Amino acid sequence: MVRAVWAVLRMVSCQGAAALNLNVSGSVIDAASSFRSVHVPFRAAHSKVRHLSSAVRMPEITTDHLDKKQVQLLSEMCILIDENDSKIGADSKKNCHLNSNIDKGLLHRAFSVFIFNSEEKLLLQQRSDAKITFPGCFTNTCCSHPLHTDSELEEKEAIGVRRAAQRRLEAELGIPMAQVTPDEMTYLTRIHYKAQSDGVWGEHEIDYILFMQKDVELNPDPNEIKSHCYVSKEELKEMLKKAKKEEVQITPWFSLIAETFLFTWWDNLHDLKQFMDHNKIHRM
């Protein structure tokens, strides 16, 4: 059971570009080594948001220096929510990820997928250097957002979120959609966290946790993913130790989940129903 001490966690922010050779499953992973740990306290959303559009004004931010494909994705419409995960509108991915708006309370819906293979090893990805938030960081299998579309807005049993996860698993990792159907994903619970990536961009999300165990075909998009690997529990624990020593970069949401719930869930992959809690939102 998760101890209360985990409520005060340090989160890992990605900065720097030095390389570290990290041995995982006999292979060598190149990871950026310079980063800083930051504590990210929860701050309740307090801005008034109009239905169907954000009341927060988007400041003038230049994206000329950013990857063109990733900039195009900034126009996608995310689902705005209140701190209880109730839908209150929609706004662009760009607006949702600006620290200036996050500081005013802008909050959106997201998901994190964890795929385990038949050997019960967890599939990790290293985010590409083209990513606008947390580039070069290691993280769980897939992390993204449901869009403000009819199919992904549907909330019964989190089916809209699970459809979004299926879409992004194909887009990022090249996993055929037929291999990752929504019915095969177990929706466990939700976490609420906030983290800055740099002085301009950040995250403020209620994150749906989705688990799945299956051997899948992979064909990653290099614009999304720099590298990927399967890790055992012990290999991930070693990676977390390296992160604490500032030797490897890990996304803040993955760090939070790994330091609290992940290993308990991992020990019970064949009996996850006991951990399903669709009522509580864990404030991280």
Image (cartoon, helix red, strand yellow):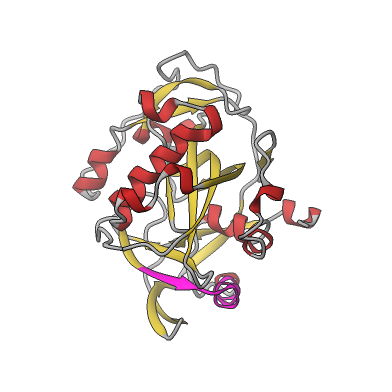
Q: Is residue 185 above or below residue 271?
A: above
Q: Is residue 267 left or right of residue 63?
A: right
Q: Position of residue 53 (x, y in %)?
A: 40, 17
Q: Nearer the viewer, residue 67 or 152?
A: 152
* Extent of the magenta region: 228-242
Is 233 colored magenta in this rendering?
A: yes
Give the residue at x 53% y 28%: 156
Q: Name, please, the residue furthest toward the bottom.
A: 26
Which image quadrant: the N terminus? bottom right
Give the residue at x 47% y 13%: 50
Q: Is residue 143 above or below residue 150?
A: below
Q: Position of residue 28 (x, y in %)?
A: 38, 82
The picture quadrant where one finds residue 76 is top left
Residue 7 visible in rendering: yes
The picture quadrant where one finds residue 2 is bottom right
Q: Position of residue 150 (x, y in %)?
A: 37, 23
- The number of callouts visible is 0
Give the residue at x 52% y 38%: 205
Q: Nearer the viewer, residue 214 or 124?
A: 214
Q: Nearer the viewer, residue 104 or 129?
A: 129
Is 59 colored magenta in this rendering?
A: no
